[in-house]
């Protein structure tokens, strides 16, 4: 895939984060309850060590990461 911003080839990789309990969620905004992890739409669960791995492509020139779930 080429970067939609600059047109250069994007590199494949893994976006990694730690989230022991909730995994990765999607929200439209930060609320009081979201600060303590309540609510949101779960996109990915974490593994048994609390790590989430997400396949993605990035353009380091534009600092753009694209990921499809
Ligand atoms: Zn780019």
Image (cartoon, rainbow, N blue to C red):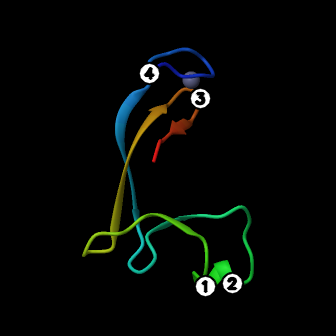
Q: Nearer the observer, disc 2 or disc 3? A: 2
Q: Nearer the observer, disc 3 or disc 1? A: 1
Mark 4 or mark 3, which is nearer the start of the sequence?
4
Q: Which residue is mark 2?
A: 33
Residue located at (61% from left, 78% from top) = 39
Residue located at (41% from left, 81% from top) = 21
Queried on whether the Cβ of the residue with tag 4 lies below 8 angstroms from ligand 1, the answer reads no
24 with respect to 38 (left or right):
left
Q: Quadrant of the N terminus?
A: top left
Q: CA distance from mark 3 to mark 4?
A: 14 Å
Farthest left residue in view: 48
Residue located at (52% from left, 39% from top) = 65
The picture places residue 12, in percent across and down from the top left corner, at 35, 33
Do labels 2 and 3 touch, CB within 8 Å? no
Q: Secondary structure at mark 2?
A: helix
Q: Secondary structure at mark 4?
A: loop
Q: Nearer the observer, disc 3 or disc 4? A: 4
Q: Which residue is mark 3?
A: 62
Mark 4 or mark 1, which is nearer the start of the sequence?
4
Q: Which residue is mark 1?
A: 36
């Amino acid at each position: 895939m080429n970067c939609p911003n600059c047109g250069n080839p994007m590199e494949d990789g893994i976006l990694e984060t730690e989230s022991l309990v909730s995994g990765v969620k999607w929200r439209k905004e930060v609320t009081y309850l979201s600060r303590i992890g309540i609510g949101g739409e779960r996109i990915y669960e974490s593994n048994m060590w609390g790590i989430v791995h997400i396949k993605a492509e990035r353009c380091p020139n534009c600092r753009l990461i694209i990921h499809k779930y």
